Amino acid sequence: MLETSANGPFVSGKVALVHAVGMHARPAVKLTKLAKRFQAQISIRASATADWINAKSVAKVMALRAPPNSTIEIKAFGEDADAAVAALIELVSADFPDRDP
Amino acid sequence: MRADVAGPAYRGRTASIGFARGPFIRLSARENSARTPGSPQDEALALRGAIQSSSEQIAELAAAAGGEATQILEFQVALLEDQDFIDPIFTSLVQGTPADIAWSSALDEQIADYDTASDEYLKARSSDLADLRDRVLRILNGGEGLVPEIPSGAVICADDLPPSRFLEIDWSGGGGLALLRGSPTSHVAMLARARGIPMVVQLGSVPDAAIALLDGEGATLELNPNAEQIGLFERRREIHRRSRASARAILRRPAATWRGERIRLLINIQRVEDLEHADAQYADGIGLMRTEFLLSGPEGIPDEETQYRTYDEVLRWADKRPVTIRTFDAGGDKPVSGFTPEGEANPFLGLRGLRLCLARPDVFEVQLRALARAAVRGNLKVMFPMVTMAAELETARTVFTEIVADLQARGIAAILPELGIMVEVPAAAMAIGDFKCAFFSIGSNDLAQYVLACDRSNGALGNLIDPLHPAVLELIARAAEHGRRAGVSVSLCGDMASDPRFIPALLHCGLRELSVNASSLAQIKQTIDRLGHGGGGG
């Protein structure tokens, strides 16, 4: 899907999940809310062998079951892909702060 | 319990104290009224409308409830807005599946997935999903999402109840909650206690009835009671009411005494907000501050600074009064994802309490640093849970001492607070003389559970879990006696101390310091006062 698309540039990044209980409901809600602010298509995965999933879907993000200390890979394409990846990395690395980033 | 009564009686566990007498209303988990499906277009329209209404209802509930409830509901709203999740449901409508079937099978699939998760947090989410499933179904079925007509003051019976259903019910006319399963530590139980709604859980199975008596204090449910049962119930309710009123007056008196000896009454807190309880100010200090709530916050295990500020806030509240903070007591029935071990065959006998903290210095040392810094700010004591051998206490003391030295070397104000242990492992209670510490606090819940070999959360063992069993009392008396001889304080901070029925036994065991829930402080002070004035039972 995304990998083969020629529709605009790719941006990707990695960030460690420092959240103590892993990717649970609150972090998942925050992550998808933030992702939805961007036009770009954004995919994430929690291990190099897993399928990429849509970062705007809370059901999919919860199903990641990303444990603490796992590495989240993010990739995006579309006009604001740069900003999207940067914002998501900041959210995860800052451990999902309560105020909106 | 009583053989001479007409209506059947059931015993569960107390989740919230209080009394309710009223019509018995059973809420089924899902109201499946017959529904005639329309064309695929109609079905899509109906489902779209039901999802929209659900979103609005949940948003309203969240706004009205605030705090913790808002966080619980936020996930449900996010799921309703998730196109990846919702779109396939609409696709199946096009293929002719009725809206209610398509909706519930999609949700049931998710619920099953969450239920099989090894992770407690994910499992807990499955009840949120069931809540969402049923809300949308109710609207689809024409119920407009309203709870079936519930008469004022009803005793509501359900298998379990999700928080959003509790918030929808109009409790202004009183009433109570009788759950067949459920748990005193659930979100609903917290909401019920906050609202003062009596609630009894783990009642097992009960038949239908017209009228019910719910006694949140005795944890009993009586159905279709006869006049005698009603009379006894009303007498208990009246005694409860009067004792609350007069207990409030007694609170203001300085100290509780029994046979000329001062009885120190401290409070247990689960989190900082518990200090807002109106009666908390009358306590002689904080006998147990649990810190596990720090582990379950939305942001995970908080850093040193956050912990320090939390401890400091409590010490400032207490002023010169003592504050005993217990280090993380996770494991057993308190799993914390990413901290407690997974897959233990017997977590109650596993890596929990201090054992776990010593195995996880990354987590433990952050807490000890925050506590060492907080210790300079007030009368702090630090207590370790689930200690079996003196060597564990000494290891923890060594780690703590090194942390204090390190902080001081870096010019940060820190001191080693008084250290003590929970007495909850029978071995520690029996060999209490081995422990060189400044104080002991008896954790009667776990002590009774381990001595009696009964899981306290197992409703089937109700009659066996007797904290007044002579073996339990002997260990309590032994600990108290050791304290008197060694000149160190011994208190009791388990649920026993918050129950007036157990107070005479505890005083006779030699205890002179009890730590109770703030909401029980008045009643316990009054109980001691009555015993002290020859009010019987002493």
Image (spheres, coloured by chain):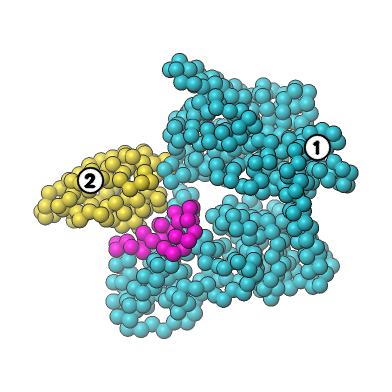
Give the residue type that dot 2 points to. Answer: Val
The quarter of the displayed image where residue B380 is located: top right
Say which element carries label 2: helix
User: Chain B's shade in the image?
Assistant: cyan
Say which element carries label 1: strand
Q: What secondary structure is the stretch in magenta mostly built from?
A: helix
Residue plotted at (45% across, 60% down): B62
Residue B387, horizontal then vertical, whole percent: 62, 31
Q: Which residue is mark 1?
A: B257
Q: Residues within 10 Å of mark 2 (few under 14, many from 20)?
A: many
Q: Which residues make up the magenta segment?
A: B59-85
2 or 1: mark nearer the eye: 1
Q: Closer to the camera, B246 or A22?
A: B246
Q: Reply yes or no: does residue B80 show up in magenta.
A: yes
Residue plotted at (19% across, 54% down): A40
Q: Which chain is yellow?
A: A
Q: Closer to the camera, B426 or B35?
A: B35
The alpha-carbon separation of the residues under discs 2 and 1 comes to: 65 Å
Q: Reply yes or no: does residue B182 show up in magenta.
A: no
Residue B397, horizontal then vertical, whole percent: 57, 22
Q: Which mark is residue B274?
A: none
Q: Is residue B452 visible?
A: no
Give the residue type that dot 1 points to. Answer: Thr
